[in-house]
Image: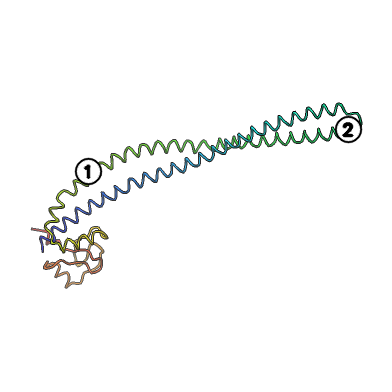
Amino acid sequence: MREQLRALVKLSEIDARARGVDDQLKGIPAELEERRGAVRALESLVSRQTAAIVEAEKLVGQQDADLASRNDLLGKSKAKGAKARTMRESDAAERELESIRKSIKDGEAEKERLRERVSATRSALDAPEMALEEQRSDLEKAEVAATARLEALRAERQEILVGRGEWSSQIAKDHLRLYDRLRTKLSPAVVEATAETCLGCRMKIPPQRFLELQRCNTLMQCSFCNRIIYHRDLMQD
């Protein structure tokens, strides 16, 4: 049983190290995706603000055309007033002129408001555009670094797993099945027990069970966390 435990300990050490690398292999793409999400959010913001500028500029253009039309109408109205023959016609022409002048004044005010909106939106766009440029640059560098890091981690994982098959072959099939079942939920799945304490969950082991653990006559599991437990002395030659 001692040799079985030694093999299980070695296997657990290998798998725990490989799992640590696996966590990094999963974490790096997740971090990159988080960065991409931030870039996409900024792109969306910049796009919306740019669209708002385009729309406001379009309205300014329409306002210009409308003002030109009103000014043309003003000129015609003045000409009509000049031809008035009666006081009634003159008063009507003056009211018409006043109405057109007011509409032109209102149009000019609206045009100014639109120009201010364009200016404010352009100013507000400066910071997001700068941030977007920086984040795109940072993302590009991060992707290059991540590619290199992922390659290094994959190579490291392969190196860690060297010899795993040899240790596995030394373990009885029923013990190996138990270990494989445990390691999907617990890491490490095999832990030392010392001073009547499981170092996996830090729970106390009854004295009688601890004595049985030291005798190493059977494979033992912690009653609380179910990890396979062993005594350090059994690992020594």
**Extreme residue toward the bottom, this view:** 208
Going 92% across and 31% down the picture, which residue do you hit? 86
Q: Residues within 10 Å of mark 1 (few under 14, many from 20)?
A: few
Q: Are marks 2 and 1 in contact (CB under 8 Å)?
A: no
Query: Badge 1 is on which residue?
Result: 155
Looking at the rendered image, the quarter that the N terminus falls into is: bottom left
Query: How is colour applied across the structure in the image?
Result: rainbow
Between disc 2 and disc 1, whose residue precedes?
2
**Drawn side of residue 88 relative to residue 55, left or right:** right
Instruction: Residue 198 in the image: state x and y as whole percent.
Output: 22, 65
Up-down relation of residue 13 to residue 116 (above or below): below
Going 28% across and 39% down the picture, which residue do you hit? 148
Number of marks drawn: 2
Instruction: Residue 39 in the image: state x and y as whole percent.
Output: 43, 41
Q: Residues within 10 Å of mark 2 (few under 14, many from 20)?
A: some
Q: Amino acid at mark 2?
A: Glu
Query: Badge 2 is on which residue?
Result: 89
Could you tell me how far apart the alpha carbons at marks 2 and 1 are, in whole angstroms? Answer: 96 Å
Looking at the rendered image, the quarter that the C terminus falls into is: bottom left
Corner quadrant of residue 150? top left
Instruction: Residue 172 in the image: state x and y as whole percent.
Output: 13, 62
Going 79% across and 28% down the picture, which residue do you hit? 76
Up-down relation of residue 186 to residue 73 (above or below): below
Task: Find numbered disc 1 in the image and state the secondary structure of the residue it sits on.
Answer: helix
Task: Find numbered disc 2 in the image and state the secondary structure of the residue it sits on.
Answer: helix
Q: Nearer the viewer, mark 2 or mark 1?
A: 2
Instruction: Residue 142 in the image: state x and y as whole percent.
Output: 35, 39
